[in-house]
Amino acid sequence: MHGVVVFLGPSCDRAAAREIFDADYRPPAKRGDITRAVDAGARIIGLIDGVFFQDCAVAHREILAALRAGVRVVGASSMGALRAAELDSLGMEGVGEIYRAYREGRLVADDEVALLFDPETFVPLSEPLVNIRATLQRALACGVIGAEVARALLDAARALYFPERTYDAVVEAAERKADPDDLARFLAFAGEHAVDRKREDALLALERIRDLVEDLP
């Protein structure tokens, strides 16, 4: 869609995104990319994925400049959720559970949404902590593990550097803190029923942007 730019990477594959609507899909945003999109005529910008530690992150001031220029900016899932939680009172729109968790202070650290991904295909190579949290909550609700095991696994996940977070690595890191049978049961559950909260929120954001596009004059 002309005038719609979406910065999308590992949170959601582009094939799924294009099933919702076609747009100018670009790689995870780095500093200056929002400004360049505005200068090129973007009317709606979806900020979903952005760089954290590989390059300079998207600056607040470029988002504010876009808003002042009359551009709608929607954020969700990853960098977009972070920036929307910080700037929603100034006009940026946040979508999804991750945005709300940052907005309400239930999440604080940037590394909750950080992950390692292939720079060419954007395929995730590690698991973001927000997804691990959600999967632990589901496993707990389903009776797969108890509260103590869930806490041990979450503590183990938080202690790992974000590129090293996988379900296998989390379980291995928790081996001395929980019963091996409980850990094996959780690992099997995660293999079949892992929650991808970042993808869920990315899809919600894309649906919201589609609705905004339909209202454009």
Image: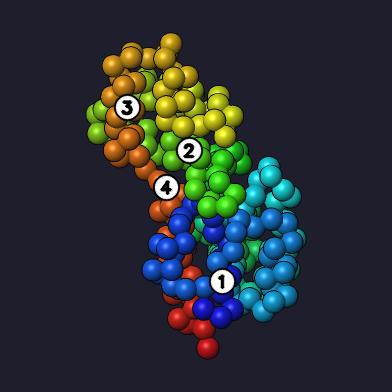
- What residue is shown with label 4? 197
What residue is shown at x 45% (from left), y 57% (from top)?
A: 13
Sequence-wise, the earlier of marks 1 and 3 is 1
Residue 65 visible in the snapshot: yes
Image check: 216 left or right of 68?
left
- Residue position marked by numbered label 1 in the rendering: 24
Q: Nearer the viewer, mark 4 or mark 1?
A: 1
Which residue is at a point 56% across and 41% down the rendered structure image? Answer: 116
At a point 45% along the width and 81% down the height, the residue shown is 214
> Mark 2 and mark 4: span between their CA atoms?
11 Å
Specify how the rendered protein is coloured.
rainbow
Whichever of labels 1 and 2 marks the residue nearer the N terminus, that label is 1
Which three-letter amino acid code belongs to the residue tagged 2?
A: Glu
Please state which of the two labelled residues, at mark 1 or mark 3, is closer to the viewer: 1
Q: How far apart are marks 1 and 2 (CA)?
A: 27 Å
Q: Quick one: label 3 or label 2, which is nearer the N terminus?
A: 2
- Of pointers 4 and 3, the one earlier in the residue sequence: 3
Tell me the kind of residue under disc 1: Asp
Residue under pointer 3: 186
The image position of residue 128, as x and y in percent, is: 50, 39
Q: Mark 2 points at which residue?
A: 127
